[in-house]
Amino acid sequence: MATSTSRWYALAALSLCTLAIGLDSTVLSVALPTLARDLEASTGDLQWFTSSYLLVLAAGLLPAGMLGDRYGRKRFLLGALVLFGAASAACAYAETSGQLIAARAVLGLGSAVIMALLGAVLTVLFDERERPRALSIWVTANALGVPLGPLLGGWMLDTFHWGSVFLINLPLVALGLIAVGMLVPESFGDRRRRFDLPGVLLSTTGLIAFTYGIIEAGERGWSDPRALICIAVGVFALGALVLWQRRAAAPLIDLDLFRNRAFTGGTLFATIAGFAFFGLLFALPQLFQAVDGADALGTGLRLLPVIGGLLAGARVAEKLAGRFGARPVVATGLAVMAAALFAGAATGPDSGYGYVAAWITAAGVGLGFTMPPSMNAALGALTPERSGVGSGLIQALRQVGSAIGVAVLGTVLNSAYRGALPASAPDAVRESVVAAPAFGDPALLDAAREAFTHGMGVSLVAAGVVTAVGAVLALVVLPRSRQDTAVLAESGV
């Protein structure tokens, strides 16, 4: 293991890489209304700008963890940073929705390797005593992308071409390459493990088909044959994946990990939190710009309460989890998130920003209570030999939750929005609320704003129900205390 000082310097390097990903995950949120105008993107296109990235990210995390274990985590991490920088440049100069979706998918591949291997390296570098603090720093670095992405992106959108929001990744990538090359030691896991090609194909097919089907159902209706076929193919492929993993000699997913309650619970509740949070980030920029009339920079400023609540919640949660264990802290966090989402469902076109700021702050606090303790519980159940595959699995399921959150909650919002519009509304307005101001019709604009807040309210209720169920499950699934977690980790239960 590296010296005490070098471990923390290495953590700084890893946090820099995490910040680049955090920026990319949120900078797009403030750019969605601009992209809808400049690229003539539909609501489905806007969902795919986010979902293409998240889907490839989720699909790539599992093989990335396995390959990093076998061939060297540092080596793959450096290659992924180069790919991430190249894809960022491709996003910046995309001229059509299709080009941007493709570039975002490649960006997701680079992010997959980075995220899978960061968790694995943390597990190797830090022991049980130091890991909670290291993880809190890592999560905070990721969380900093929430305000910095919208703020930097908002300022750049108001000053430069929209492609500039992706170019801010390049300096961070350059610094990350230097820092990782100098400070992060090479590490390996199980180098004898074979590559599970059928597992990779089944997981990729299942994730992409299922989410594509959900988005198409929102665009074409839930009776559309293509949407239903895609959903069915996705469910079948994911079911076949589980069956294959039970009989494969070298499975992509180590199903034995789910015998550990701390791993299963931590992964599950981090996934639920990601589901609700990314669904929320999809709706808020459109609320602030299309309904409240804010510009891109103003949208970034209006998102600051989310990160403020998250950072405060994470700081308090670290202390409480150290004393009482993850179980009550995670359950409380999910309950707070659910209450905030239900409160947000009452937001109307005339609601003041003070009300919105209050409930999104509470949502951030709930996320801060939920995410770091959940991740620490799951990572703490991994041995160094299984850290690559295990960390990849944790991150994959968390990103699946995020992707499905955007797809499902975006589809719910879109369907409810269209259903609340008057029948005479133009097709452009039915495609996206950001098109309404261009028609110069006050009555149409008021109707579109009312319909959007209605659709957002329905999606927030759906997210609130999921997180409320998660709060109840946390009291059942997670170990009672830190001592119980340690015992379960040793026994594999």
Image (tube, helix red, strand yellow):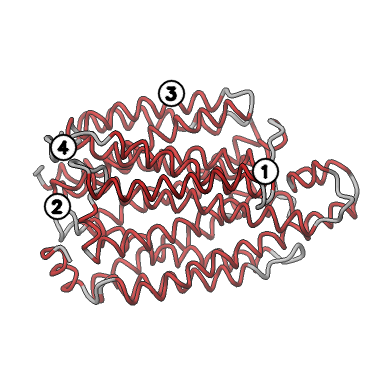
Mark closer to the observer (3, 2): 2
Left-right relation of 91 to 19: right
The disc placed on residue 193 is 4
Q: Relative to 192, is 19 on the left or the right?
A: right
* Mark 3 or 4, closer to the camera: 4
Instruction: Name which residue type carries label 3.
Output: Ala
Which amino acid type is shown beneath numbered disc 1? Answer: Thr
Q: CA distance from mark 3 to mark 2?
A: 34 Å
Amino acid found under the numbered disc labelled 4? Arg
Residue 340 drawn at (x, y percent): 55, 70
Residue 383, which numbered label?
2
Q: Nearer the viewer, residue 364 or 391?
A: 391
- Image: 63 above or below 264: above
Q: Earlier in the sequence, mark 1 or mark 3?
A: 1
Q: Position of residue 351 (x, y in %)?
A: 72, 66
Q: Secondary structure at mark 1?
A: helix
Q: Which residue is mark 1?
A: 43
Marks 1 and 2, how far apart in space?
43 Å
Q: Earlier in the sequence, mark 2 or mark 4?
A: 4
| Secondary structure under the numbered disc 4 in the rendered image | loop
Residue at 52% over, 54% down: 405
Q: Earlier in the sequence, mark 3 or mark 4?
A: 3
Height in image: 218 above or below 16? below
